[in-house]
Amino acid sequence: MQYLNKVNLSEIKDRYDFFVAWGTGSLFNMNYQKDHLPVNMLVDGTKTNIGNKIDKLVVYGPEDIKEKIEGKALIIIYAIYEVEILNQIAELGLEVDTIIYNLLVLESIGIKRYPFWNGKHADDILLLELVRRLGVKKKEYLDIGVCHPVMRNNTYLFYEMGWKGVLVEPNPIFHSLIKDYREKDILLPNGAGVYNGELEYYAFLDRLGYGTFDKEIGELRCKLGLKYSINKIPIIEINEIIENNFKEYPTIIDIDVEGMDFELIQKIDTDKYPIEIIMCETLSNEDKYSAMMIQKGYLKYAKVGENTIFYRNDLNISGLFTQYSFGEL
């Protein structure tokens, strides 16, 4: 069984005799809560850390799971390569249940819970803070460049709260996951652009977050020796996406398209579609983005990780965000 919704560890713990954490990379390092999760085995599908010890547990390869498992097992996935992991589990003939780490609530203490956020650097928590301080009411988002629909995702928290939106993702690897985890959202299996047409999409099997339509970036990443494929993907002009999928316009736009963020935001007709909040990957070019956003009528709210959050300058921010609270907005 593949868990597709949040579940408390305390409610399912007695169903399992053996717990496996699959993935020992950055998501594991940032999110593994050893004091709250009784893991019996660590697995590294990339084989980078096989043989090493983490918290006194030896890291094994996928082929070692079958002989090590004792009784009924739950595999907790700490990597965005969920589709590949599920395929490996099937190929190995393992009769196990799986859950991604975001959906396994380890402990609740008052209003707090683990995990606290889905975004890579708690980007979604800052978005929630801004939404509440602005007092916006329309519960709609546009997520361009979704990648995994839950892990490291900035709009899943809002989906949990009853918001709905449009998810634009050109990489077919993620389409089945989006349909499973975000069935109430609209999936557009194409790219967003500054015009309608087709572009070559560079997909990297070993670095799923590296996918890009930017030819220069794509070619540079190909030279790194990564496994890749190049396919022509339909592109829909960003204003047309808004016009065709929203009654008015979304409250939040989250953009992460690996090299084309600036052009996309510049293209948005913010006079016709005065979106309240726009978040995008600015990396080291924050000043360039901020200057452009000021011209479009937006102010910077916060820089978090690779992203910067902007809000419409005619809106008033009030109150303080003082607690983690995940109820209905």
Image (cartoon, helix red, strand yellow):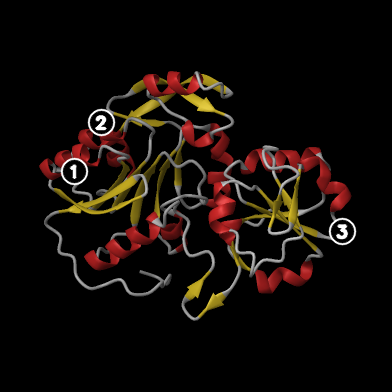
Determine which of the numbered discs, if any, sits on residue 290 in the image.
Answer: 1
Q: Which amino acid does label 1 sit on?
A: Ser
Query: Would you call the spot at circle 2 few (<14 residues within 10 Å), some (14-19), or many (20 or more)?
Result: few
- Left or right? Give the position of 32 relative to 94: left
Label 3: how many Cα within 10 Å (few below 14, some 14–19, many 20+):
few
Mark 2: which secondary structure?
A: helix
Q: Is residue 306 left or right of residue 63?
A: left
Mark linked to residue 263? 2
Give the residue type at disc 3. Glu
Horizontal and vertical percent for residue 155? 41, 53
Point out the frontmost of discs 2 and 3: 3
**Residue 149: numbered disc:** none
Residue 238: x and y, percent?
29, 34
Residue 81, placed above or below residue 131: above
The Cα–Cα distance between marks 2 and 1, rounded to whole angstroms, is 13 Å
Determine which quarter of the picture holds residue 256. top left
Measured as percent of width and height from the top left, residue 81 is found at 61, 41
Query: Toward which corner of the image does residue 328 lie, by quadrant?
Result: bottom left
Q: In which quarter of the image is residue 291?
A: top left
Q: Mark 3 points at which residue?
A: 70
